[in-house]
Image: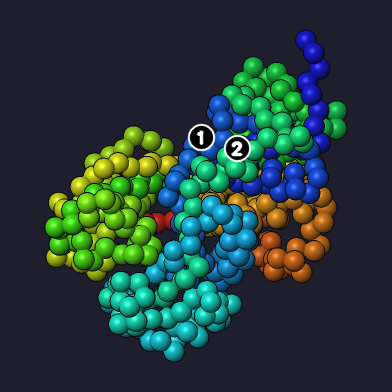
Amino acid sequence: MSKPQHHEIVVIGAGIAGATIANELLQLGKSVCLIDSATGPAAACSSHPYAIAHPHIGRGSPRLLRLTRVAFLLAEERWGATWKQHGVFQPTRSGKTFHREEMTQYLRSLGLDEQMALALDAKEAQKTCGISQSGVWLPRGASLDLSMATQSLLSPHEHLQCLWGVGVESLQWLDGKWALLNKDKQSIVSSDKVIVAAAMGTKALMASVDIRLPLKPVRGQLSVFSVSKKSEWANRLPKVALSGDGYCLPAQELEGGDYRWVVGSSFDEGEEDLRARQSSDDFNREQARGLLDYEQASCADLKGEGSFVGVRCVAGDRLPIIGRLVQRPGVFLATALGSRGILWSALAAKLICAQVLEDDLALDARFGLAADLLAALAPARFFAGALAAPSALGALASNSKPIFPSGPKAK
């Protein structure tokens, strides 16, 4: 049996996160081996054609809000031609009074100037967005076809080797390097540095080296609706994307005057079923009424034309897990991206590549990633007590029980 190939850097996972990290390393002149159990890139949640991106301005910790601003700017810069900028409007939550001055002050406290976020009353929103609700207009908000973006990042390159249809089941520290093993415990390749960007698959891989991560799957279903030009909905459909309890893309007018409208998504914690459900479409119809503040409209006029089902990976604190796994030198993680894969992938590429190349001292100066933000992303936040060296591979204790995000469910 021939000796397995050795690589300086291996990336496990060819979704949007793994592809972005691999591409960043290639741009920096490094050679990369990328491994995925699928037959090509973007086979799972990154096959999503309707992803949305905007700075986060609603509920969430101050660190989350600061992080999404940095991540949004990085994503905007990275995806250029495939970035579909159409703006995103976030309506004022039902029952909450709109105060322009207060909202404007809040937006500025997040570092969002008028080019990124603008408070609008209902009349202004109607003129700008076609929505008669007050709220916040995010003119640089956009959507992205994750599948297209992922594939473009992995176009042929002399320093990129892709191993498709190869499942990595475990890692083993052997002779001063990481061995990547298949289900038969045979070594596939070895590597000095391993970047794990395998969504929920990260949990099992880390368990193989006695690292326990509080990861949980969340099933989400997007619905594609057909709306007749004669429907009462027709004059209310948005010309921009909306984000609130759920989200939608701008309605697309078809030849003949009818519309195609994408609305989502359901939020089913702990579920990994990829089959489309009528109940999830019904849930999204209700979300559509809420987004447009149009409770009297008939949901029957939203005719189901298709759906996209994906399983997101989330961590206990709803922040991504990005960075060096200090207790296992040479291992780096990019997981728990949740519903913000566009943003977190762009951030992960900069952060992990800086750490892989041992240039992380410049992260704050270049990208605004201060020490507290890096700590908020780091895998180490889930562990307490002594951290074992890779030779020991001892079990680690979690510093708390994971608390997973609550939200509406569609069964």
2 and 1 marks in contact (CB < 8 Å): yes
Q: Amino acid at mark 1?
A: Ala
Q: Residue furthest right?
A: 175
Instruction: Check the image and report above or below for 271 versus 67.
Output: above
The residue at the far front in this view is: 255
On residue 43, which mark appears? Answer: 1
Mark before the other along the chain sequence, 2 or 1: 2
The chosen color scheme is rainbow
Residue at horizontal 53%, vertical 38%? 42
Q: Is residue 315 above or below residue 331?
A: below
Query: x%, y% of residue 83?
Result: 53, 56
Q: Which mark is residue 199?
A: none
Q: Which quarter shows the C terminus?
A: top left
Q: Secondary structure at mark 1?
A: loop
Locate residue 7 relative to residue 112 in the image: left or right.
Answer: right
Q: Secondary structure at mark 2?
A: loop
Which class describes the residues within 10 Å of circle 1: few (<14), some (14-19), or many (20+)?
A: some
Q: Residue drawn 26% across and 43% down?
A: 305
**Does the image show residue 388?**
no
Please tell me which residue is depicted at 18% across the width and 57% down the height of the picture.
229
Choose between 209 and 347: the one closer to the eye: 347
**Left or right of 365, for residue 92:** left
**Label 2 sits on what residue type?**
Ala
Find residue 53 and report its horizontal and vertical position in percent: 49, 59
The answer to whether residue 48 is seen in the rendering is yes
- Residue 175 location, quadrant: top right
Residue count near mark 2 (Cα–Cα under 10 Å), binned few <14, some 14–19, many ≥20: many
> Picture coordinates of residue 97 (x, y %)?
32, 83
Identify the residue under disc 2: 14
159, 411: nearer the viewer: 159
